[in-house]
Amino acid sequence: MLKAYFKPDAIKKRIHQIDLVDLVKRFDLIVLDVDNTLAIKGTIQIDLETDRWLRTLSELEVHVLICSNNPTRAAKTIAEVYHFEWLNLALKPFKFRFQRKLNQMGIQYQKGVWLGDQLFTDIWLGKRLGFHTILIEPLSTNDYLSTRILRYIEKKVIG
């Protein structure tokens, strides 16, 4: 039972490999992690394919929230380029900051999807919220020691 909270519904190498038409048909709220999902950790540089994917997403009728545990303004900076909502210092995997942000935005959703690179923050929170979850392989292996340890454990959990 507990392992189900950490098992993503899908795994993709890069976020731009996800079919946006299918995603928007199935979900009315899309949550995107920043660090090592959209951009290499510590930067706001987005590769060309991901930029195209995000620009297409911004033209579709769906709520999008850029979400980051990082206290920097990366989430805001990226979100503003694509006209998405944003939340930094999200304190994932805890729910309260995310739920407060949705309430502030007045977003009502039926089905959400969470896309991120970490099992114990993005996927776990997404599962606890009842979201479909997609684990994205991290863009970089240049992580904090604590994240490297968690990634080692992630590999054991995923199998």
Image (tube, rainbow, N blue to C red):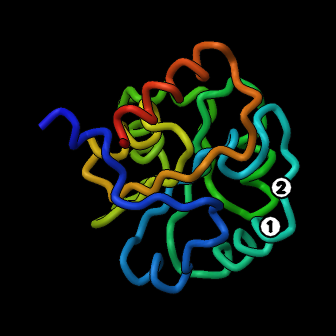
Residue nearest the viewer, comparing 96 with 23:
23
The image position of residue 100, as x and y in percent, is 41, 36
Residue 58 locus on image (x, y percent):
67, 73
User: Which residue is located at x 45 percent, y 53 percent?
Assistant: 114
The residue pinned by badge 1 equals 51
Left or right? Give the position of 15 relative to 154.
right
Kind of residue at disc 2: Ile
User: Residue 142: x, y in percent?
Assistant: 76, 29
Residue at 79 percent across and 42 percent down: it is 40
Tell me which residue sits at (31%, 46%) in the image.
Answer: 7
Is there a contact, CB below 8 Å, between mark 2 and mark 1? yes
**The C terminus sits in image quarter:** top left
Instruction: Say which quarter of the image contains residue 20.
Output: bottom right
The image shows residue 68, relative to residue 134, as above or below, that is above
In-image side of 81 versus 103 (left or right) = right
Determine which of the numbered discs, if any, sits on residue 134 in the image.
none
**To which residue does mark 2 refer?**
46
Q: Quadrant of the N terminus?
A: top left
Counting residues from the N terminus, which is met first, the one under dot 2 or under dot 1?
2
Question: On the picture, is 49 further left or further right than 10?
Answer: right
Determine whether, in the image, residue 72 is placed left or right of residue 4. right
**Residue 45 versus residue 26 in the image, above or below:** above
Q: Secondary structure at mark 1?
A: helix
Q: Position of residue 67 (x, y in %)?
A: 58, 43
